[in-house]
Amino acid sequence: MSVIKSVGNNGQISIGKEFAGKLVLVDQVEPGVWILKLGEFIPDNERWLFEQRTESDLDEAIEWANNTAPQASDLNELESRVRDV
């Protein structure tokens, strides 16, 4: 569906209240031609969480945490490990 919109003095185009607060990817394919895509986007500093290796490591860690009962830590033993490194 094509719709003609007017660009306001502030450089904005309204695409409708139903999109208020949503994230939109604006892709300029050539001067004067844009493609808008509604979606959820990953911030650059969180992108590493979605790399295949990291994702499988996190899945493994979550599975371990779900299947392993909590237990008290021996802080003296942990401290000695740090000193030995």
Image (cartoon, helix red, strand yellow):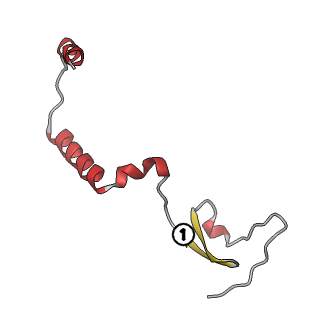
Residue 5 screen position, x and y as percent: 75, 79
Give neighbour class at mark 1: few <14, some 14-19, many 20+ (Cα, 10 Å). few
From this viewpoint, which residue is outermost toward the bottom? 1
Image quarter (top left, top right, bottom left or bottom right) of the C terminus: top left
At label 1, the amino acid type is Leu
- Placement of 48 over or under 81, stated as above or below: below
Vertically, is 36 above or below 57?
below
Q: Residue at x 19, y 13 (%)?
A: 80
In the image: residue 71, left or right of residue 46: left
Q: In the displayed structure, does residue 78 sit left or right of residue 27? A: left
Q: Quadrant of residue 78?
A: top left
Residue 3 placement, left or right of 29: right
The answer to whether 61 appears left or right of 6 in the picture is left
- Residue where numbered disc 1 is placed: 38
Q: Residue at x 19, y 20 (%)?
A: 73
Q: Position of residue 6 (x, y in %)?
A: 79, 77
Q: How many marks?
A: 1
Foreground pick, 52 / 13 = 52
Up-down relation of residue 39 to residue 44 (above or below)? below
**Is the residue 25 above or below the residue 49 in the image?**
below
Q: Residue lying farthest top?
A: 76
Quadrant showing the N terminus: bottom right
Q: Position of residue 36 (x, y in %)?
A: 59, 73
- Give the residue at x 67% y 68%: 17
Circle 1: element type: strand
Looking at the picture, tell me which residue is in the foreground, 18 or 44. 44
Q: Position of residue 69 (x, y in %)?
A: 15, 33
